Amino acid sequence: MRSFSNTYIFVFSLIMVTIVAVLLSFVSTQLKPRQEMNVQIEKKQDVLRSVGRAEDAAEADDKNAYINEEFGKYITESYVVDFNGNRVEADAFEIMLGLTAEIRKAREERNYPVFVYSENGGPKKYVVPVRGKGLWGPIWGYIALEEDLNTISGAVFDHKAETPGLGSDINTGWFQEPFTGKTIFNEQGEFVSVEVVKGGADPSNIHQVDAISGGTITSKALEEMIMDCMTGYVAHFKELANN
């Protein structure tokens, strides 16, 4: 039986590892544009879902083309503001893609992207992205406001690793739909956001929704996410509402 020296085995293993590494790097490089495109399509679809659009994405022959067409048709404007409500020179979509890094900054130092929805020149809706940390990983969402910059017209949320059947339910319709019609400012014009209430919201309270039974930590994390992210838009919302 032929034997191999330790040196031969080491060199052979090194060569094979190098070849595999090169192949994996090549595949990753080739797939990266498609992966980035898929992320962009997902973001656009979620923005559209927050205003009740992109309902037929699953049935579309070409989902990407469908989403891009819907986004171009209904998202008529996008821009970025700072904490004081001033517009800044930045790309709203790029900021949204990098929101993870943005929320690591102090609120006063962040850039805040805004997407404006309108159909045939009708009333505008303003969509803002939110992102935070759940029980087991990132959670995020998109909240659309009516033209009064106070009433929520729609909200979508999602997660990376929340507990199935519990915190993971933040991406279900039964949890998201009650946000519609809630308001984020009180009668005195103070920003109060939306409270996610364990044990059930008061039906007469226009600032409360039900928490997920058994998913209290994720529910409160989502409440904190909305408060944290939307606080940065308050100055801008008030300015728009007063114009």
Image (cartoon, rainbow, N blue to C red):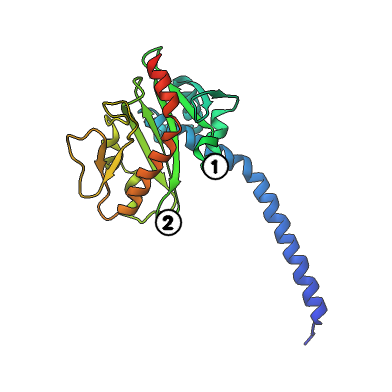
Residue 56 at least partly seen? no
Nearer-the-camera pick, 211 or 166: 211
Crowd band around label 2 with a 10 angstrom C-alpha radius: few (<14), some (14–19), many (20+): some
Nearer-the-camera pick, 106 or 216: 106
Mark 1 vs mark 2, foreground winner is 1
In the depicted structure, whether residue 242 falls above or below residue 17: above
Among numbered discs 1 and 2, the one appearing first in the sequence: 1
Most extreme residue toward the top is: 121
Q: Could you tell me which secondary element the residue under label 2 belongs to?
A: loop
Q: Could you tell me which secondary element the residue under label 1 belongs to?
A: loop
Q: Residue at x 36, y 26 (%)?
A: 145
Q: Quadrant of residue 232?
A: top left
Q: Name the spot of residue 168 as percent of width and height, x first.
A: 35, 51
Most extreme residue toward the bottom is: 1
Residue 198 at least partly seen? yes
Crowd band around label 1 with a 10 angstrom C-alpha radius: few (<14), some (14–19), many (20+): few
Q: Residue at x 21, y 35 (%)?
A: 205
Nearer-the-camera pick, 76 or 228: 228
Q: Name the spot of residue 104 as percent of width and height, x first.
A: 53, 45
In the depicted structure, whether residue 8 falls above or below residue 110: below
In the depicted structure, whether residue 174 falls above or below residue 111: below
Q: Quadrant of residue 229?
A: top left
Q: Give the side of residue 208 with respect to residue 140, left or right.
A: left
The amino acid type, in three-letter code, at marker 2 is Trp
Q: Name the spot of residue 157 as percent of width and height, x first.
A: 38, 41
* CA separation in Å, label 1 and label 2: 21 Å
Q: Which residue is mark 1?
A: 105
Q: Residue at x 28, y 26 (%)?
A: 188
The amino acid type, in three-letter code, at marker 1 is Lys
Q: Give the side of residue 219 with respect to residue 64, left or right.
A: left
Kindly indicate whether the residue at mark 2 contacts the one at mark 1 (C-beta within 8 angstroms): no
The label shown at residue 136 is 2
